[in-house]
Image: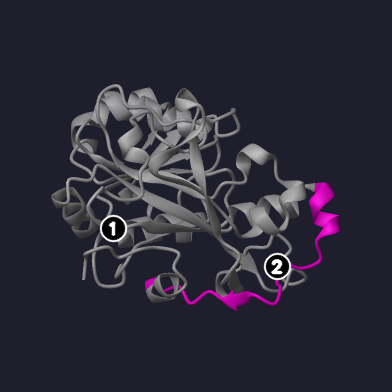
Amino acid sequence: MRYPSLAALLAAKAPTLAKGPLSLVLAEDGVELHSTLAHQLKTGFRDVVLLAPPGLDPPADLADRIHTVTHDVFADGALIAAVNQVIDQVAGAWVHYCYNAEYLFFPFCETRRVSELLAFHAEERREAMLTNVVDLYAGDLTASGNAVALEDAWLDRSGYYALARKDRARHNHPKERQLDFYGGLRWRFEEHIPPARRKIDRISLFRAKPGLRLLPDYTLTEDEMNTYACPWHHNLTAAVCSFRTAKALRANPGSRHAIQSFRWHNSAPFQWHSQQLLDLGLMEPGQWF
């Protein structure tokens, strides 16, 4: 069913959505919309909400399993505003958000569902999970002009780094257990990326609570929820494998003509398997085995 607004969906379905886990997918266009929604359903989200412009509908074979909402996807901070509109109405539910052509991976996701991941994470008294955005890109830009190709997807196997996150309220003293992560296409082609958009970390899995808000840099207003681990040991982290940056660099006239290929000596074919991401250190299994 398609709803005319997010408010209309929440008025009709908030108690159901609050059971979670809930996924919000903002479709900026129709690129890999089917694979994105199918991946969310396969991962095990109880409800998937598609935020889409008028005229963009979910694929027919998935439509009955998706809540589709007409949304201004091109407004500034459209996804962040939608997440914040939902939070108070689904308090207690685990929420994930992403864009089309993005895919959530977590340790052992081939055999375990997202509800199992979040149940374990909650048992460790964690209410949010760090997810790093891992850029995917087509290996052959001649064959895939928009840089999106599931069968020819590549990623960077090195070039990732983290810097201490500064606490402005404490004279830029480093925040405890918080880092700003960088790497991928946003690092290699940083001259085409505004500084505020170069970070690759998101808190894109969290438990909703009244008054909590998602900020423009994809962190939350409750500081402890932005940490990558608890004080006593490492915790689970996940990855969002995303064609979004590659797609944007190909759509922008300036960067499109400046970039002939995204591949370099540290590129590797993406295997669409969590073990590769674990081996590359792009996510952390913590104490979960």
- Give how far across and how far down residue 33 sits, in percent: 50, 54
Q: Residue at x 43, y 30 (%)?
A: 82
Does residue 138 appear left or right of residue 256 in this picture?
Answer: left
- Look at the image and tell me in which quarter the N terminus lies: top left
Q: Is residue 28 something that shows in the picture?
A: yes
Q: Residues within 10 Å of mark 2 (few under 14, many from 20)?
A: few
Q: Please give the name of the residue rendered at 38% of the width and 50% of the height, measured from the top-left corner.
A: 130
Q: Determine if the magenta segment contains residue 2.
A: no
Q: Which residue is mark 2?
A: 144
Task: Give the structural element (helix, strand or loop) at label 2.
Answer: loop
Total numbered badges shown on the rendered structure: 2
Colour scheme: one colour
Magenta segment boundaries in residue numbering: 253-274
Q: Mark 2 or 1, which is nearer the eye?
A: 1
Residue closer to the observer: 217 or 32: 217
Q: Is residue 72 left or right of residue 235?
A: right
Look at label 1 and name its amino acid: His
Splitting the image into 4 quarters, where does residue 10 fall? top left
Question: Quick one: 254 or 57, which is closer to the camera?
Answer: 254
- Res 161 quadrant in image: bottom right
Residue 272 among those drawn in magenta: yes
In the picture, the quarter occupied by the C terminus is bottom left
Q: Residues within 10 Å of mark 1 (few under 14, many from 20)?
A: few
Look at the picture and state if 8 lies above or below 145. above
Which badge, 2 or 1, comes first in the chain's sequence?
2
Specify the label residue 234 is tagged with.
1
Q: Is residue 97 visible?
A: no
Mark 2 → mark 1, Cα distance in angstroms: 39 Å
Three-letter residue code for mark 2: Ser
- Give left or right: position of 24 versus 125: right
| Residue 275 position in % (x across, y down) | 38, 75
Give the residue displayed 60% in from the left and 33% down from the top: 74
